[in-house]
Every structure is written in C-alpha cells, then in structure tokens.
Image (cartoon, rainbow, N blue to C red):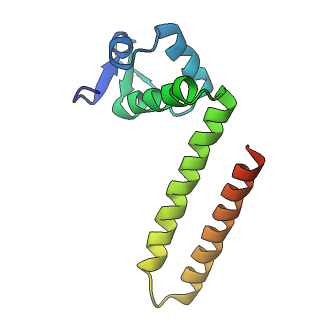
Amino acid sequence: MIPNKSNFKFQELTPITGVKPYVIRFWETEFEEIAPVDSDSGQKLYARKDVEAIFKIKKLLFDDKMTILEAKIAIKNRDIEVVTQAAQSDVNEAPGDGDKVFLKNILIASLQVISDIKTKRNW
C-alpha cells in the first residue's frame, strides 16, 4: 500500500516497495517510467507515479518472471493500449467531422496492427 503522499524520499522506497536500494537505482537507468527529481537540498524525490512504476516493474520481473527487455515491452504495449482506448473514445464522441473520424480510425487500426505484431512476435 502506497502512503497518501505526493513525493517520497529515496530512503522511504525500500520499506514501501520491498525493493532494495541498489535495485531501484539500477531500474532508474533501465526504465524511463522511474524519473525522480532532485530537490533543492540535493535529495531525490519520487512522485507517486514513480512508486507505482516500481510496483509494476517489480511485479513484471519478480512475479511474472520477465526479463528486463520483456518488462519494457510489456509496459510499452500497455501504453499503446491506453492510447488506442483514448483514440477510440474520441472517435465515438466526434460525430459529424468525417475526415477526423476517418483519420482516427486509421490510427486505431494501425496501433492495433502494431500491438498484434508485437504480441505474435513476442517483442
């Protein structure tokens, strides 16, 4: 459970996430989803989304037994699905503007093809 705070110090992450500090530092270099900022005092501050990303990465690597590359791909695929869903909802809300609807439908179909290829090829 993540405490109800907006920012976390580095020392707070291990007790919250159960991930060792050196692993978190390594993941920062591997996953762009973890992007702490430096405070005025020089400490790294992690936003709630960073902590959520650590939990997501931990699940993919430790529970689902994925490699780092597989975890990166899984995260990217989820991002594509979110974009696809958002585009689909926009299309449903935009009647009357034929060109925009047509272009959004092409985008949705293209994203679905990319997602299917990645899934079939296990990228």
For residue 78, say whether it is visible: yes
x and y percentages locating residue 94 in the rendered image? 44, 81
Q: Residue at x 47, y 32 (%)?
A: 56
| 30 sits to left or right of 25 | right
**Quarter where residue 75 is shown:** top right
Query: Is residue 34 visible in this depiction of the protein?
Result: no
Q: Which residue is pictured at 72% across the width and 50% down the height?
A: 118
* Quadrant in which the N terminus appears: top left
**Furthest residue in direction right, as rendered:** 121
Residue at 69 percent across and 50 percent down: it is 119
Residue in the foreground of this view, choosing between 118 and 100 = 118
Residue 76: x percent and y percent?
Answer: 60, 44
- Residue 6, percent across and down? 27, 30
Which quadrant does the C terminus fall into? top right
At 50% from the left edge and 16% from the top edge, which residue is drawn?
24
As drawn, 82 above or below 27: below
Nearest the viewer among 46 and 92 is 92
Q: Nearer the viewer, residue 39 or 27?
A: 27
Q: Position of residue 105 (x, y in %)?
A: 60, 76
**Along the line of sight, the residue nearer the viewer: 12 or 113:** 113
Q: Is residue 69 above or below residue 8?
A: below
Q: Is residue 122 left or right of residue 72?
A: right
